[in-house]
Image (cartoon, helix red, strand yellow):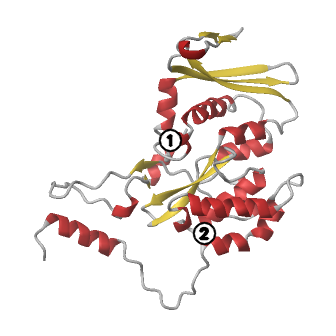
Amino acid sequence: MSTNLAERVANKRTRSHSPAVQPNRPAQPTLVQFVQQMRPEIERALPAHLGGADRIARIALTELRRVEHLAECTQESFAGALMTCSALGLEPGGVSGEAYLLPFWNKKVRAYEVQLVIGYQGMIKLFWQHPLAAGLDAHTVYEGDEFEYEYGLEPKLTHRPARGSAKGRPTDYYAVARLSNGGSAFVVLDVDDIETIRKRSKAKDFGPWSTDYDAMARKTAIRQLFKIIPKSAELARAVAHDETVRRDASPEGLDVPGDYIEGETVPQPAPQGAEQATVEDVPSQFSGWPEAAEPAAADAAP
């Protein structure tokens, strides 16, 4: 037996992640082939006013080539995320900002799974499907802005943005909804509130939080606002499936909240020769991607 710690770690990882030998198991189609096979189901799931499964399928295929490790995800989780997007009428790609398909390593099932993140534009799009919807705004407040708000029996919010270099750094994010019956509501979150919520996300250090932080911060304010205003059935489903994994691609699966497993970023491997106290049960090539925590952590979901 090797007495070298680095060799023991490497040997353990090799043994832990060796695929089980299943000679009689039929070969599964690749995710690219799987998307092609899903077109009839996508067509049936799309809302009546959004014809064309071909566009959704093309976007999904583009994401498979663009997003690292997405093509390695389980077919069940990929199908669940894609069918949720289709049923809600959201494009599953980062260009539109409506929804994102993000891979994370689930060490319990020893595989990548797809987490669906509803984007800022997707939340706004679904809000307008409610018959009472009259207006929705979300903004960033900067140090140089004139900004005052007050909750209570007579809530009020005033925001006069600064211009140019006088803006400074972001201090707050807020969302305001107006209803056709004359009602209105708003929610204000400071940067510490946003960070607290971001750190609970499996995708806190990559994906839209990394590339579109401001939009995700405004979406966070919108999501908090949606807790206190009327929601369409589609919006309620979107909130239930946001940042979760859906493994049931059947039509009934849309009415069941997705599986939220809070994750944490996999630590970078220790430098060669450095002592390592524990051995992570995650392959080294997955370093830097989120790792699923134990199921009990799901209680911490926002």
The answer to which image quadrant residue 86 occupies is bottom right
Q: Say whether residue 38 is left or right of residue 128.
A: left
Three-letter code, disc 1? Ser
- Cβ atoms at labels 1 and 2 below 8 Å apart: no
Can residue 248 be seen at all in this image of the molecule? no
Characterize the local packing of mark 2: few (<14), some (14-19) or many (20 or more) Cα atoms within 10 angstroms. many
Q: Say whether residue 107 is left or right of residue 140.
A: left
The image position of residue 82, as x and y in percent, is 68, 59
Nearer the observer, 154 or 273: 273
The image position of residue 48, as x and y in percent, is 89, 55
- The circle drawn on residue 134 is none
Number of the front mark, 1 or 2: 1
Total tally of numbered discs in the picture: 2
Residue at 31% in and 73% down: 14
- The circle drawn on residue 75 is 2
The image position of residue 273, as x and y in percent, is 14, 58
